[in-house]
Image (tube, coloured by chain):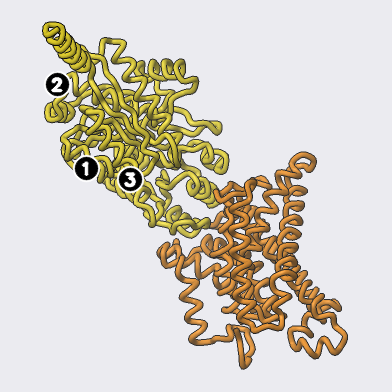
Chain colours: A yellow, B orange
Amino acid sequence: MKSTLVSAALAVALAGSFLACDKNKEIKIGGVGPMTGEAATFGASTKNGYDMAVAEWNAKGGVLGKQIKMFFADDKGDPAEGATVFTKLIDENKVCAVIGTVMSKVSLAGAPICQNAKIPMIATSSTNPKVTDVGDYIYRACFIDPFQGTVGAMFAYNDLKAKNAACIFDVGNDYTKGLSEFFKAKFTALGGTVVGYEGHATGTTDFKAQLTKVLAAKPDVLYVSDYYNDVALIAKQARELGFKGPMLGGDGWDSPKLMEVGGSAVEGCYFTNHYSQDDSSPLVQSFVKSYTAKYGSAPDALAALGYDATNIMLNAIQTAGSTDGDKIKTALAATDLKTVTGQVKFDDHRNPVKSAVIIEILGGKQVFKTTVNP
Amino acid sequence: MGSIFSLQQIINGLQLGAIYALIALGYTMVYGIVRLINFAHGDFFMVGAYAAYGAFYLFNFFLPQGNTMAFAALIMAMLGSGAIALIANKFAYKPLRYKPRLSSLVTAIGVSMLLEYLFSALPFIGPSPRGFPDLLAKHIYHIGPAEISNYVVIDLSVAAVLMIGLTILIQRTPMGRAMRAVSQDKDAAKLMGIDVERVISFTFLIGGSFAGAAGLLAGLTYPRIQPYMGILPGLKAFIAAVLGGIGNIPGAVLGAFIMGLAETFATAFNSLLGEGIAFVILIVVLLLRPNGILGEKTADKI
């Protein structure tokens, strides 16, 4: 009887240790994204990107010789919900790293939790500069907004050979103001002249006064850092005032509505974006092909960033040779990885330094033009 | 300074002024007849833009593109806004006609909000901005240093034709005479056998349809429409009417063109100043000349 008990206890202990051992064969990472709420479509694309990257790593044998298990949580696009799910992933699921999330305001709620727990986090498409300022465990996969202004200026000066440029932006919106500021700084630094720099009030529909003023200085290009709704109106009114040169902008232009409302006025204009599915690089093409095969639609920028963020993190775990947060963090800082959205290195603020794509509007469609390296 | 007070900026200002003028006329006519500041008037302008937008998609099947379509859209915009103005008058303002004037004023604000939120709530309109279709192909003429598009010509000529029509209506027709009589003395007009309510309804119809025409022109010129698009132009047209002398028809037109030009010049100088110039004008007018440029002196106003 006694020996039976002992052997049973032994068996249980053995089974327990075996189970624990089995668990150790997995690398647990967290994934966060909004699957419901206002940003639900963004979350769906992003999650597809995570899943695809994890599946590819697992097919190649995983990380550190172990299979990857991703715990995915829906943040609902809500900071309070985000704080809850980040805590849950770290405390209950014991993940060694978190990938996500999409919206800046939710990433800002999750980042302090990761920082305090010393769990590395990489946001996907949170562009607010404050996100990575939370601490040294927090990274992001996308470039921050103002960077697009820099890239736009380089494209205007180097590729379009523009010598004079003018900027139009919304004075009530940090995104569009930031883009124009950085465009102006870079364009001037390159040797160009910014001959007009005019803001407009939020919500206005009449831009003719500002346009007349900046166009009087005969700019070669017009940098319009607004969102697509305003861009369409500005483009139409600029054409009415006789401007024939190209207009440039940032990823706020990325909507079919721009071509619908802007029509011929936005033809031959360019904007910067994170990635283009028409990019001819083999990495992008193989990503687009396998994504389309798996999900039935072409990947958007959010899917690409979700995919890249996962790859950057898993690559860092592999390089670190450990699931220890501190070691992963050090490996992340030394990242130099070719991803779908460009060659990624991180600067001192843990923002990626990488290329942007230039998209041209031709025949009412977005066409990949070129890649610009910073 | 050349790019601020240039010929091009004057054209921009006149184009904006033409739209303000059509809205301001409705404000001033209604005020002249019933002494009501109809704060829902800016929303009649919005209704006109949507009526023209709807007309374009309805008539697209059987009307040819171009002038016919643009004319049909103009008629629909004027009818749509005119109808809304009539309905607002019948159900919201008429029951309060002989109540204290403040009741009508507050009701007008209510009608304004009702229209804005109703249009946002209607599933086929909704709160998001919509692009307004190009009803006419765009041509650009170079005149000296300025670029004038056919849209500028259309805006100014539609406004001019309507304003001339209104002058003839008021000065030369029996209805016009009745309108003038009611605006001078409602009770005396009634004693002379004028159907005052009919004259008031007619005034709302004309005022509303002018706002509708402005809605179409604004849609063409600044091709983005949304349910709240009437608030600011309505407010600015109201200030234009006050500047010209509220109740005075030539005054409203004069005030509107001054407003359009002032706003354009101020915006060219500094965009935030441009947004605020209307209110600066309002304060200055109320301080220095509360009756407006062409307004007659009367003992009581609002």
Nearer the observer, A289 or A98: A98
Q: CA distance from mark 1 to mark 3?
A: 13 Å
Q: Residue at position x 59%, y 49% from top?
A: B126
- Please say whether residue A348 is visible from this viewpoint: no
Q: Which residue is mark 2?
A: A322
Query: Vertical placement of A109 versus B174: above or below?
Result: above
Distance from disc 3 to disc 2, alpha carbons, whole Å, reads 31 Å
Question: Along the polypeptide, which appears first: circle 1 or circle 3?
Answer: 3
Q: Give how far across and how far down residue A297 sits, in percent.
A: 49, 23
Dot 1 and dot 3 within a common chain: yes
Residue B164 at x, y percent in the picture: 75, 70
Q: Is residue B301 above or below residue B10?
A: below
How far is the residue under mark 2 from the one under mark 1? 23 Å
User: Which residue is label 3 attached to?
Assistant: A80
Question: For the point 64% across and 89% down, which residue is it?
Answer: B296
Pointer 2 chain: A
Residue type at tag 2: Ser
